[in-house]
């Protein structure tokens, strides 16, 4: 495949330390233009990426006829508007999570992408992590109901902008969507209900939205997935862990580094340890490239993006009301 000519919008630490090295190493992408509101940051990435130019005006990138696709890694409140503008400019779109901060924003993204006929992917990378892919393979033969537990814990300081509902959407929208997508990817049936309990565990004078809690997703076949989101966690303890129980079998993924699987007999057991943590970012970008060049399905495309977004909004609503919130497959199966 010829390299896909991309524009980068947003030059924060995540772009610099995660996506940029993978883009440059893949050979599938050529960075043409770089944009950030902080022009100095954009110029720094331009140098590292060998891009033609840096700008603080996203419109310049979107108007560039030499750019085929954009990668959006800005703050959350700009994701939907930039995705809509990029689609309307005829650019393929890879946007970091979340898809948007409201159902209306997400629906506008859907409409713009469908009207333009461009490839759209959102950054729910965990479902593409090698150990998660292997977990799906191991569990695929079994249609029995599943119980899944996922832990997401870390110190997430009160001053972080994600806790601002208007900018970051809060922890459950800003990062919880990752885990809702992951649980759905490990389930054989669609989600039908969300129930959440929690609140503000950080300094309530600084954080005015629920930052921690437990969210339970119920699925159409009776399966249940639960995630614990802790913002006042420990940096000295692994951030994430996933457990799956199904048909007399148990599976554990330890922080996207190690997989332990116990079958009905020891002969079917599996142990797999990676040389380093892999949350799927490399495979996600490779799949995005294949979708553009080879017409393969978009990774985390519109239905999957919308599904996790709606689950995150339902979790916030349940946290506020203390009541379960129904989810319909018709809302995200486009």
Image: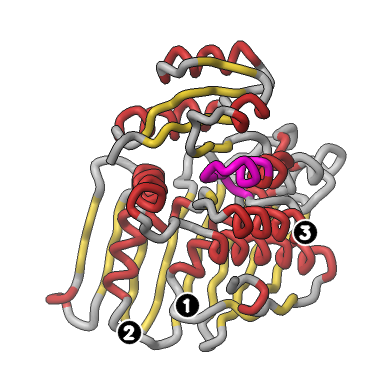
Q: CA distance from mark 1 to mark 3?
A: 32 Å
Among the two numbered marks 1 and 3 on one chain, the one whose residue lies closer to the N terminus:
3
- Residue 50 position, x and y percent, is 41, 16
- For the record, the magenta segment spans 85-98
Give x and y (percent) for residue 43: 55, 12
As measured in the structure, the alpha-carbon distance from the residue carrying label 3 to the one carrying label 2 is: 37 Å
User: Element at badge 1?
Assistant: strand
Is residue 56 left or right of 274 when viewed as pictured?
right
Asked if residue 62 is positioned above or below residue 321 in the image, the reply reads: above
- At 33% from the left edge and 62% from the top edge, which residue is drawn? 133
Q: Quadrant of the N terminus?
A: top left
Give residue 142's mark: 2
283 vs 267, nearest the viewer: 283
Residue in view at x 48 percent, y 26 percent: 16
- Residue located 44% across and 54% down the image: 126
Residue at mark 2 to residue at mark 1: CA–CA distance? 13 Å
Magenta stretch containing residue 249, yes or no?
Answer: no
Q: Which residue is mark 1?
A: 147
Residue 90 visible in the snapshot: yes
Q: Residues within 10 Å of mark 2 (few under 14, many from 20)?
A: few
2 or 1: tag closer to the N-terminus: 2
Q: Name the spot of residue 226 as percent of width and height, x first.
A: 56, 69
Comparing labels 3 and 2, the label whose residue is closer to the camera: 3
- In this figure, which residue is indicated by the disc labeled 3? 104
Q: Is residue 97 magenta?
A: yes
Determine the secondary structure under disc 2. loop
| Left-right relation of 36 to 247 | right
- At label 1, counting other C-alpha atoms closer than 10 Å, the crowd grade (few under 14, some 14-19, many 20 or more) is some
């Amino acid at each position: 495949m010829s390299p896909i000519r991309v524009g980068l919008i947003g030059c924060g630490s995540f772009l610099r330390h995660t996506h940029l090295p993978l883009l440059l190493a893949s050979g599938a992408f050529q960075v043409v233009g770089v944009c950030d509101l902080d022009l100095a940051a954009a110029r720094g990435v331009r140098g590292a990426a060998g891009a033609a130019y840096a700008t603080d005006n996203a419109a310049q990138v979107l108007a560039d006829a030499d750019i085929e696709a954009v990668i959006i890694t800005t703050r959350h409140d700009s994701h939907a508007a930039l995705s809509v503008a990029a689609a309307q400019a005829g650019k393929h779109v890879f946007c970091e999570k979340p898809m948007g901060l409201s159902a209306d924003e997400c629906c506008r993204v859907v409409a713009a992408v469908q009207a333009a006929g461009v490839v759209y992917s959102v950054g729910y990378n965990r479902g593409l992590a090698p150990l998660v892919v292997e977990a799906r393979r191991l569990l695929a033969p079994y249609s029995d109901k599943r119980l899944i537990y996922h832990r997401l814990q870390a110190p997430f300081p009160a001053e972080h902008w994600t806790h601002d509902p208007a900018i970051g959407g809060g922890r459950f929208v800003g990062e919880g969507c990752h885990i809702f997508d992951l649980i759905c990817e490990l389930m054989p049936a669609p989600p039908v209900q969300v129930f959440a309990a929690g609140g503000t565990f950080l300094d309530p004078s600084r954080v005015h939205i629920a930052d921690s809690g437990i969210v339970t997703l119920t699925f159409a076949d009776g399966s249940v997935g639960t995630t614990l989101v802790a913002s006042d966690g420990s940096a000295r303890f692994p951030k994430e862990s996933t457990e799956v129980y199904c048909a007399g079998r148990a599976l554990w993924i330890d922080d996207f580094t190690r997989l332990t699987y116990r079958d009905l007999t020891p002969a079917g057991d599996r142990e797999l340890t990676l040389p380093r943590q892999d949350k799927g970012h490399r495979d996600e970008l490779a799949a995005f490239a294949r979708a553009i060049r080879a017409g393969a399905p978009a990774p985390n495309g519109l239905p999957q993006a919308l599904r996790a977004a709606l689950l995150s909004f339902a979790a916030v609503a349940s946290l506020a009301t203390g009541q379960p919130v129904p989810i319909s497959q018709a809302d995200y199966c486009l």
